[in-house]
Amino acid sequence: MKKILSAIAVLLVCANAKAQLFYAQGGLNLANITTTNDGHTEKNNMLTTFNAGFMGRFGLSKEVDLESGLLLTGHGSKAETYFNGGADYVKSTFNPLYVEVPLNVIVNVPLDKTSGIFFNAGPYIAIGVGGKSKTNSKIGPITSSSSSSIQFSNDNPFTSQQDDAAYDKLKRFDFGLNLGGGFQLEHIILKVNYGFGLAKINSTESNNTANDKNKYRTLSFSVGIPLGK
């Protein structure tokens, strides 16, 4: 795992050394998941988390560019599952952290010499590295609560084969699409992005494309500060 992250970091450092725009990014994530279609997760609410890292653009042209980088980003949700007509329940708040590598196509619309609007779209891959899960449950007269560190399995992200699926045991690998835009000013970049996860995070279904249930959905608001150039 450490070797994989180190290799990704080295590649991105080498790539961004040639970037025309290199910037530090940080911001707010509003994270959620899609609910399962068999009732295992009946309600889900947004979870507030964060994103932080470094991004670089390569200066292909004034109108169209490529962007990549390395981000630490939070996903998750406040999920609720009910049994016995709603008398019993399991409520889980889980906040997994991933190292994400996006690859975006950037379309620039200049407003003047130092500012403009941009739109971004492209794929991402991500590796789970940490996070916490908290659970409150009621089964009959018995109530309980627990907190644990999230464990990541090494399941193939293109399938959904996982034993003992739970919100504190998730797939290590995720992939999906980003879509967003923002304003590029002289000394600051303002961004909004929607992460559309394509891998089922812990379902026992055998096909990620069977439906859009049990996948990450993350709305991000970020500020970028250009470095160096």
Image (spheres, rainbow, N blue to C red):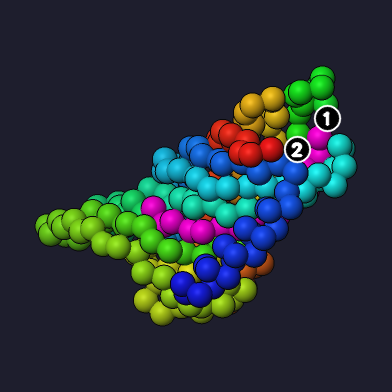
Residue 116 in sight here = yes
Query: In the image, what residue type sits under mark 2?
Result: Phe
From the image, tell me which residue sits under label 2. Answer: 119
Q: Is residue 133 above or below residue 185?
A: below
Foreground pick, 61 / 131: 61
Name, please, the residue furthest toward the top: 112
Residue drawn 76% across and 23% down?
Answer: 114
Give the class, few, some or many, for how many residues have Cα within 10 Å of label 1's Cα (few <14, many ≥20).
Answer: some
Q: How many labels were placed on the picture?
A: 2
Q: In this view, does 10 lie above or below 179?
A: below
Foreground pick, 168 / 165: 168
Query: In the image, what residue type sits under mark 1?
Result: Val
Q: Give the range drawn in magenta.
A: 95-109
**Residue 111 x, y percent position in the rendering:** 81, 21
Residue 112 on the magenta span: no
Residue drawn 64% across and 65% down?
Answer: 11
Name, please, the residue furthest toward the front: 228
Name, please, the residue furthest toward the left: 141
Q: In which quarter of the image is residue 175?
A: bottom right
Residue drawn 56% across and 41% down?
Answer: 24
Of the numbered discs 2 and 1, the one sitting upstream in the chain is 1
**Residue 139 x, y percent position in the rendering:** 20, 60
Give the class, few, some or many, for how many residues have Cα within 10 Å of label 2's Cα (few <14, many ≥20).
Answer: some
From the image, tell me which residue sits under label 1. Answer: 109
Contact, mark 2 vs mark 1 (Cβ under 8 Å): yes
Mark-to-mark CA distance, 2 and 1: 8 Å
Residue 122 in sight here = no
**Residue 22 x, y percent position in the rendering:** 66, 44
Helix, strand or loop at disc 2? strand
